[in-house]
Every structure is written in structure tokens, then in C-alpha cells.
Image (cartoon, helix red, strand yellow):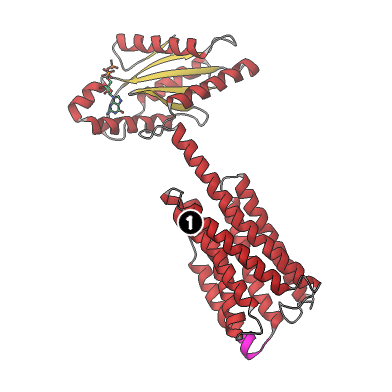
Amino acid sequence: MSVLDPRSIITLSGLMGLVMALVLYFVRRSYPRKLQGGLRLLATSPLAWFAAALLYGLRGHASEWLTVVLANLILLAGTLLFYVGLQHFFTGRARWKLWAGVVLVSTPVVAWFTMVMPDYGVRLLVVNTLLCGLFLDQIRFLMRQPSSFAQRFTLAAMGLQTSVLLLRLISVLAGLAGHSMMEPGLLQVLYVSSNAMAVQMLTIGAVLLATERLRREFEHVASHDSLTEALTRRAVLELADNELARLQRYGEPLSLMMLDLDNFKDINDRLGHQQGDAVLIDFANRTRAVLRRPDQLGRYGGEEFLVLLPATDARAARVVAERVRQAAPSSPQLACTVSIGLTTAQGPDDTLDAMLARADSALYQAKREGRNRVCEA
Ligand SMILES: Nc1nc2c(ncn2[C@@H]2O[C@H](COP(=O)(O)OP(=O)(O)OP(=O)(O)O)[C@@H](O)[C@H]2O)c(=O)[nH]1
């Protein structure tokens, strides 16, 4: 047990935290600006944990103001920073004032039980209860975020840390707190080791969250049109292929609409290209607003769109197409009409090329018959 003394574990884990903080700081630079704020905070918290570990490590060689009061304050502040960083990372804003107040108020309490009425058990109780509360609140927040490997990994790290803190609280209540964190007892060694592991896992979790988010951003950019946020032609055609495969396997119906804004060249010529862009954006928004969740809108070309209607037969597709045609623009300046060519898959032997060709010829029939209508093939 003498090899695994708490001081060495605390110092080592602090150093590893420092390395992870540096890694996070450097990877942060290659991330989109909107993620950088949250990542900077997430990188700062292992730095704070490192500073707290250094101060704890000086126990016996420096004043208790530094090694207990300030060390605990920095530990709590670092944990709050992690929480604030997570909130920024996921939502772009953070609620931190209440927790900051609680952490600040706890400092004179810790100071009292260090300098005036020294009591290691009470200090432990105060600091561990706050840490537990902070981690439980973070777990609650993180569980509401989109599920992913990184999210589950970070939750596991927080779960581990919270269990260790709870066990330690129980040990205090059972009178097993001991007299100092540096005591080389089994409980202390277990506590500082799991704490060290949880800190590493939390920082790795932050790196994983950032990497996963970056991958999602790239995927989004690659599969979405930057003007209208509709799927790109390639992405919507890929989805159409998948839906056709489902049709062949499960026999679910599939309908497809080709949409073309009417006299769009006129709109551009009369109102300018920029206003034309605004019309396209508004059209995409209002179309999405009248579609169901599984339906997909893609930009097929300039002012031409494709809508994929999975599990939709011809009758239901006709209703959707009429709804899209009649969807109102958000202002009269954005008004435009649309012609729609509609088709439904004709059994498992139908192909995407054949469906596109039918939708295209139905669309041209709609144009020939005077525009602003739905035709079917
Ligand atoms: N503003 C804007 N215009 C675009 C964009 N992509 C294509 N266009 C324009 O859309 C117009 C399409 O014109 P046409 O193919 O002649 O069709 P149309 O005027 O809509 O006539 P019909 O389809 O027959 O009703 C062209 O003037 C293109 O320059 C875009 O991203 N933004």
C-alpha cells in the first residue's frame, strides 16, 4: 500500500489532466467557431483539476488556506466549468449563476472547518455533497442530449465519479472518513484512484463529444444544400435508393414528387437574384412545414426539388402534393407557384430511374397544362 500513496496518485492524475487539457485546447482550434467556446471551457476544467491536485499535493508543506480552502474552491469551480462548457457545447448558452453562488458560499464554510473548527469529516461532507449535486445535475442535462457513444461514455464517467463521491459520503457518515486525504488507507487510495480515472474519462469524453460533433457537422454540410437546407441531389437520391430497397423487402409503398417553381426566371429578372434566393428558401421552409417527419425534401437542381414520400400510396401522395402546392408563402413578396409531377412505385421491379423519368414527364405535363398544378404518371 505504501507504493500507492494518495499524494502520488493525486499528483499523477493531475498531470494526466494537464496533458488532456492541452490536447483539448489544441484540438479545439480545428473546430467550427460555434463549438470553440464550449470546448475552451471543457479544456479549462482539467486545468483547474490539475491546479487543485497540485495544491492538495502541497499538503503539509504550505498553508491550509492554499492546500485545503483554495484547493477545494478550485476543484468545485473546475467541475462547474465542465458543466458550463457542456451546456455551451450543446446549447450555445449556460445557466451557471446558482451553482456559482453555492460554490462561493461553501468556501467560508470550508474555511471555518479548516481554520476555526478543524473537522475533516464536515469538510468532506460539504465538498462531496456539492460535487455530487453538480455531477447529478450534469448527468440530468447530458441525458437530455442526443444519444451517441461519446454522450454515453461521458455519462459513464460522470456515473463513476458520482458513485465514488456517494460511497465517500456514506463512509463519512459511517465514521470512516479518516483524518486527512493523504492518509494511506484503502478507502482513500480507492477514492483518489477512481477519482483520477473519472477525471481522465471526463476529458476523453469531451474530446469524443467534440469529434463526434465535428463528424456530424461535416456529414450535414456534405448532405445538405447550403441555401435551402434541403438534402443535396446525391443525398436524396441515395435515400430514394434505400427506400426502394425497403419496398422490395417489405412491400411498403413509395411515392416521389418532382417540383419545379413556375416562371422562376421571371422572378429573378424582376426582383433580382437575391430575392430569387429568398423565394427558394421560403419555398423549402413551407414545403418542409407541410411534410411528415419521414418525408424528405431534396434540391434536385436550381429551382427544382424532389420530395420522397416513404410508406405513402398514390392516394395519400396526391393529398400531400396538393398540400405542398397550396402551402402559403410567409409574405406576398415571396409568393410563387409550383408545378408538381407525382409518381408511385409500381411494385418491387420498379427502378429509381424509371420513377424519376415518370415524375419528370408528369411535371412537364403540369407545365404544359398551365403550371401551378399536380400531374401524375
Ligand atoms: N436566385 C436563384 N436562381 C436560380 C438558382 N438556381 C437556378 N436559378 C434560376 O432559375 C431559373 C430557372 O429558369 P427556367 O429553367 O427557364 O424555368 P422557369 O423560369 O421557372 O420556367 P418554368 O419552369 O417553365 O415555369 C434560371 O433563371 C436560373 O438562373 C438559385 O439558386 N438562385
362 relative position to 350: left or right? left
| Residue bounds of the magenta highlight | 112-118
- Residue 259 position in % (x across, y down): 38, 20
Quadrant of residue 147 within the rendered picture: top right
- Residue 19 position in % (x across, y down): 58, 61
Q: Residues within 10 Å of mark 1 (few under 14, many from 20)?
A: many
Q: Is residue 308 above or below residue 332?
A: above
Magenta stretch holds residue 216: no
Q: Which image quarter has ligand 1?
A: top left
The residue lying furthest to the bottom in this view is: 116
Between residue 243 and residue 154, name the one nearer to us: 154
Quadrant of residue 64 within the rendered picture: bottom right
Residue 333 visible in the current orientation: no
Residue for point 51% across, 40% down: 216
Q: Secondary structure at mark 1?
A: helix
Residue for point 68% across, 76% down: 124
Tell me the residue that label 1 is attached to.
Answer: 38
- The amino acid type, in three-letter code, at marker 1 is Gly
Magenta stretch holds residue 117: yes
Q: Main secondary structure of the magenta part?
A: helix
Residue 130 visible in the current orientation: yes
158 relative position to 268: left or right? right
Q: Can you tell me whether the CB of the residue at mark 1 lies under 8 Å from the nearest atom of ligand 1?
A: no
Q: Is residue 16 above or below residue 340?
A: below
- Residue 373 position in % (x across, y down): 34, 16
Quarter of the image for the N terminus: give it. Answer: bottom right
Tell me how many marks there are: 1
